[in-house]
């Protein structure tokens, strides 16, 4: 399509700014948008009929865990209209590996769905792989705190020495110089969970000095949600870094009233001048590794050490005592989504309450035994929040909408296959939670501006021609919790840098 001009003709434009929808055409040539709205169509142009469609900037997934899959050319996001992804979230990035490559893979494989053969020494090494011939999205990478900590100290839960913190600062500066767009923490994941505020202040100061963004999976989203937000706002205020709070939610029925207070805290900081925003996905359920149910000290030292602890009656009792105090979910709200081995595949799709009943044991013992049997390779879905809070968060003016999707060896969360059609079909068209132009802004212009994606996110002359065209009457996600690996409907065209990556006929064609 790049040889001749390309015209997207007859559609309704959602330009990424949040402005009202309007009819207009888009002219593309040599990978860029040349004109928008009305113009003389060049004689040599290829014309795409976009009647009865919405023409939008390519969707941006600003919180993804497809760090390895973006290299493989996987199409799950492309089929949703996504043309750019932000990876390296929640403290997990595939670099730097330092002298601890095996520990890095042990730490991240539950999120990355990886094998034993990946790992890069630097941001430049990783980013060069994302630009290969199989790439279907533009990749923007954060450097993860957990990965960074492992590179300099291995999987240790302790206070780091001055020389190791200085080494992390150097890694950060190098990664930023090589193209990383920011820094992420996963303060509920060992070993990053052992970092104190002084360590985080040092690293956030580098973020601020380099004018990058700091994204955080906070220490708590349940009973101590407000304290966790306050900690992050202090980091942003004291260093001046831009703060992005990841997948904001109030976890657990007992904590649902905290959601309004959490938004108030963020709004107050914003009014004071803190550069803060947050993101959230359009589902009440989240997804993570089952080891997250355990106390953080149990994860120090990696998988082999965890297995030893799970084999000790004394250590299991200590874990149980702490788990039952800190858990915000009911056992019936935790569902197995993926398991490493073949022998326990029948448990996928069952709740921990159901598994405990089937095995004639307490749920906490079922957790310990299953982790032991599977060498820790178990993923879960967590039904965390209320629809009322979800709607309030998605509609907030400081909210970006994301997938937070990751691949598993089993059933993924339906957000991996369905986030953006779910937003535009079910939530916008059917349930009328928000206007189309608002939803498009939250998945195009807003994240592009927030994450420094120059030339992306808007339908404007001179911008990169990343464009998604969809049918507003038919767009929908077919992915469910029971059958999540189903492709969506209603995406008509996906164009990245002027090149058509997806063309699907309308149902009437």
Image (cartoon, helix red, strand yellow):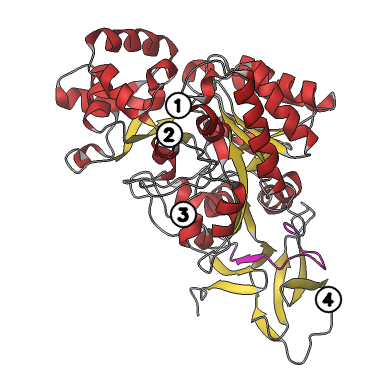
Q: Secondary structure at mark 3?
A: helix
In primary-sequence order, the first of circles 4 and 3 is 4
Q: Secondary structure at mark 1?
A: loop
Mark 1 vs mark 3, foreground winner is 1
Q: Nearer the viewer, residue 332 or 303?
A: 303
Image coordinates for residue 346, horizontal then vertical, percent: 19, 40
Question: Which stretch is magenta?
Answer: 456-471
Q: Secondary structure at mark 4?
A: loop
Q: How far is the residue under mark 4 from the one under mark 3?
A: 39 Å
Is residue 74 in view? no
Q: How far is the residue under mark 1 from the one under mark 3?
A: 25 Å
Residue at label 4? 38
Identify which residue is drawn at 47% across, 51% down.
Answer: 68
Residue at label 3? 69
Mark 4 vs mark 2, foreground winner is 2
Identify which residue is drawn at 50% across, 40% down.
Answer: 97
Q: Is residue 456 left or right of residue 40?
A: left
Image coordinates for residue 240, horizontal then vertical, percent: 80, 28
How crowded pointer 3 is (Cα within 10 Å; few <14, some 14-19, many 20+) is rated as some
Mark 4 vs mark 1, foreground winner is 1
User: Compared to 405, does 204 lie above or below?
Assistant: above
What is the quadrant of residue 145 in the picture?
top right
Residue at label 1? 155
Is residue 413 in view? yes
In primary-sequence order, the first of circles 2 and 3 is 3
Q: Is residue 454 left or right of residue 54?
A: right
Q: Secondary structure at mark 2?
A: helix
In primary-sequence order, the first of circles 1 and 3 is 3
Q: Is residue 92 left or right of residue 276?
A: left
User: Compared to 27, does 442 lie above or below?
Assistant: above
In primary-sequence order, the first of circles 4 and 1 is 4
């Amino acid at each position: 399509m790049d040889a001749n001009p390309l015209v997207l003709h007859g559609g309704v434009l959602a330009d990424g700014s949040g402005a009202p929808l309007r009819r207009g055409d888009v002219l593309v040539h040599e990978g860029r948008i040349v004109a928008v709205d009305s113009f003389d169509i060049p004689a040599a142009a290829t014309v795409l009929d976009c009647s009865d469609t919405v023409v939008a900037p390519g969707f941006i997934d600003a919180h993804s865990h497809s760090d390895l899959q973006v290299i493989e050319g996987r199409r799950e996001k492309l089929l949703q209209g996504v043309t750019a992804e932000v990876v390296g979230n929640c403290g997990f990035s595939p670099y730097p590996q330092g002298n601890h490559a095996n520990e890095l893979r042990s730490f991240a494989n539950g999120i990355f769905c990886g094998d034993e053969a990946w790992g890069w020494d630097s941001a430049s090494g990783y980013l060069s792989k994302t630009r290969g011939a199989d790439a279907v999205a533009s990749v923007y990478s954060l450097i993860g705190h957990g990965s960074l900590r492992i590179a300099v100290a291995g999987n240790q839960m302790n206070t780091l020495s001055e020389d190791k913190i200085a080494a992390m600062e150097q890694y950060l500066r190098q990664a930023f110089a090589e193209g990383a767009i920011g820094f992420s923490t996963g303060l509920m994941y060992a070993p990053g969970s052992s970092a104190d505020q002084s360590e985080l202040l040092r690293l956030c100061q580098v973020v601020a000095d380099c004018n990058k963004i700091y994204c955080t999976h906070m220490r708590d989203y349940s009973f101590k949600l407000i304290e966790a937000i306050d900690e992050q706002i202090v980091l942003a205020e004291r260093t001046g870094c831009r703060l992005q709070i990841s997948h904001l939610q109030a976890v657990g029925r007992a904590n649902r009233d905290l959601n309004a207070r959490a938004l108030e805290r963020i709004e107050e900081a914003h009014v004071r001048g803190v550069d803060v925003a947050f993101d959230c996905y359009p589902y009440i359920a989240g997804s993570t590794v089952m080891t997250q149910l355990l106390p953080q000290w149990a994860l120090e030292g990696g998988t082999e050490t965890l297995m030893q602890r799970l084999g000790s009656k004394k250590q299991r009792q200590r874990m149980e005592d702490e788990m039952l105090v800190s858990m915000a979910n009911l056992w019936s709200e935790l569902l197995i989504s993926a398991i490493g081995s073949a022998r326990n595949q029948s448990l996928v799709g069952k709740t921990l309450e159901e598994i405990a009943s089937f095995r004639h044991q307490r749920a906490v013992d079922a957790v310990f035994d299953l982790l032991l049997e599977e060498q820790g390779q178990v993923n879960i879905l967590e039904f965390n929040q209320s629809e009322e809070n979800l709607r309030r968060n998605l509609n907030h003016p400081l909210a970006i909408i994301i997938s937070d999707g990751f691949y598993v060896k089993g059933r993924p969360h339906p957000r991996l296959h369905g986030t953006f059609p779910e937003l535009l079909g079910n939530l916008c068209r059917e349930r009328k939670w928000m206007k189309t132009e608002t939803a498009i802004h939250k998945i195009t212009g807003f994240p592009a501006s927030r994450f420094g994606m120059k030339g992306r996110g808007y339908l404007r002359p001179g911008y990169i021609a990343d464009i998604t065209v969809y049918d507003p009457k038919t767009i929908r996600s077919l992915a469910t919790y029971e059958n999540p690996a189903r492709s969506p409907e209603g995406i008509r065209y996906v164009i990245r840098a002027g090149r058509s990556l997806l063309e699907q006929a309308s149902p009437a064609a």
